[in-house]
Image: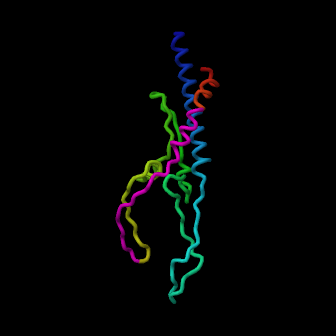
Amino acid sequence: MHDKMLKRKVDRQENRVLYIFGSFVRMDVRSKELNLKGKRKTVNVKRNNLGQFQSGLKVKQHSKAGERPRQWQGLLRKFMLYDVDKFKKSVVIGAKKLGRSRGAGLMEHGGSFWYRLRKKHTGQVHRGTATVSARPFMQRQFDRNLKKLPDIYRRAGF
């Protein structure tokens, strides 16, 4: 009887430590990695009906490979979640999957995906594949917070 109570108390403390660790990683990813707002660069690339260049056209400027990803709508930052798996005694930290999107995994590790775009005015459909180079944002903060884990355990009474 006494062993069961002790085991239950230790399990609760371990789960608490995992929740704290997950919240630290999530908070750091959201505040330090995914807070880079998208930039727009002014370029002269289009001509008007008279053949003259339009001035001041704004074009999205994406992050370079290996840099933090820029956010345009903020969905990756908004849907960054964590939870503790009590049976496996582990914490799962990541972005919620939105539909069939693989966006978070592609940003972290890179890879290719297929796309289908329809032009609004003509109705033409363009299909193809695109390759995305890695823009890691999770692993860096996970490793950084892993150093805090012994201190978290110590504060929990282990």
Quarter of the figure with residue 74 = bottom right
Magenta region: 122-147
Percent position of residue 70, x then y: 55, 56
Percent position of residue 62, x then y: 52, 61
What quarter of the picture does the C terminus occupy?
top right
Quarter of the figure with residue 22 = top right
Quarter of the figure with residue 116 = bottom left
From this viewpoint, which residue is outermost toward the right?
155
Q: Nearer the viewer, residue 74 or 3?
A: 74
Determine the residue positioned at 60% across, 38% down: 24
Determine the residue positioned at 60% across, 43% down: 28
Query: Is 145 one of the magenta-colored residues?
Result: yes
Q: Nearer the viewer, residue 117 or 150?
A: 150
Query: Is 53 one of the magenta-colored residues?
Result: no
Determine the residue positioned at 40% across, 69% down: 118
Residue 67 higher or lower than 150, as above or below: below
Percent position of residue 60, x then y: 54, 66
Q: Nearer the viewer, residue 139 or 96?
A: 139
Residue 91 higher or lower than 36, as above or below: above
